[in-house]
Image (spheres, rainbow, N blue to C red):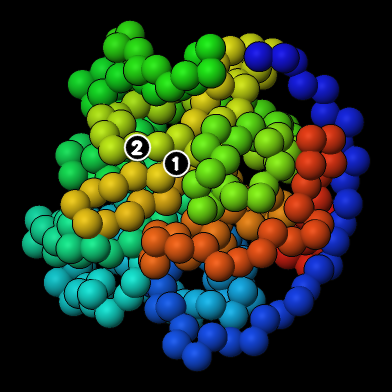
Amino acid sequence: MKKFVPAAICIAAVSLTVHARAATPIRVMLLDGQSGGPYHAWQQTTPVLKKELEETGLFQVTVVTAPQSGGDFSAFHPDFAAYRAIVMNYDAPDWPAPLKTQFEQYIKNGGGLVIVHAADNSFGTWPAYNRMIGIGGWRGRNESSGPLWYYKDNKLVSDPTAGSAGAHGARLPFAVTTRAAAHPIMKGLPPIWMHAGDELYATLRGPGENMTVLATAHSELSNKGTDHDEPMLMVLKYGSGRVFHTTMGHDVAALSCVGFMTTFQRGTEWAATGKVTQKIPAIFPNFNTITFRADLAPSK
Ligand code: ZN
């Protein structure tokens, strides 16, 4: 695919039409509480994700913070069924078996699931979780977790080459290319848009069942990349449940990108309801312009 030269004009935009609150808000659980390291500061990113959802006027977001790994889970009984979707800003190695079963049942029975960035690192050895998210990285994943998935010659391919899973280069801006323009989440988005500086996840592996890749980005060799077009946005079916998976969103700077924000808001609505009723903001980025929400971005 053609090399992209990001002219990267940044537009700081404080948009905001705050919409009237829907009569019946969509209840969403935003799950956090652990990450694989200090580099995923859920204490900082959760309030931004919550604000982005709530300002649409569609969602009522409850933050649920899980105990630390190895901590006491005996009193941790989140009421998944009370929510239309669970947004995972959460990366943990494992859960007690009854909690896993409860979560699997919830999604199988039609619950929505939204995977943000390092949530696809979570639960490397939980087979059902890996089927829900399609592909993931780190936490022990390798060829036994499934093949690599990427776009080649404009087609999704699975590659059984052995090796580890999960890689990224420096946090640079990159172009995101739409691969499923007719999907409700993508309808009306430009075919290519620039994402603010973020980790571009590559070499993700998994079963990739019932998975539709909505958008990809080219992983540049010059930035420790694969030279493949890597999946950035995906949707999956798991039983009757809908899953929206974005590999973007490393930190608050990445979350403040209007492209991240819009696809996250639309993806969450789709996971919860199967529909998208939101308009594309006028300040959505295009092929050579990055736009970000100055009011959400970290102060420099
Ligand atoms: Zn990250």
Residue drawn at (32%, 75%) of the image: 83
Query: Residue reaching furthest front?
Result: 182
In the rendered image, is residue 102 in sight?
yes
167 to 54, vertically: above or below = above
227 vs 59: above or below: above
Are circles 2 and 1 on residues that touch, CB within 8 Å? Answer: yes
Residue 226 figure quarter:
top right
| Label drawn at residue 211 | 2
Residue at image position (47%, 51%) is: 116
Give the residue type at disc 1. Met
- Residue 255 - label: none
**Would you say 31 lies left or right of 230 here?**
left
Residue at the spot of label 1: 234
Q: Is residue 201 visible?
A: no
Where on the picture, by quarter, is residue 163? top left
Q: Position of residue 280 (x, y in %)?
A: 69, 59
Q: Position of residue 9 (x, y in %)?
A: 90, 41
Gap in angstroms between the C-alphas marked 2 and 1: 7 Å
**Crowd class of label 2 (few under 14; some 14 to 19; many from 20; radius 10 Å):** many
Direction from residue 217 to residue 6 in the image, left or right? right
Taking the spot 26% from the left edge, 57% from the top edge, the residue there is 241
On the rendered structure, is 140 left or right of 294? left
Location of the N terminus (image quadrant): top right
In which quadrant is the C terminus drawn?
A: bottom right
Residue type, mark 2 in image: Met
In primary-sequence order, the first of circles 2 and 1 is: 2
Judged from the image, the secondary structure of the residue bearing numbered disc 2 is strand
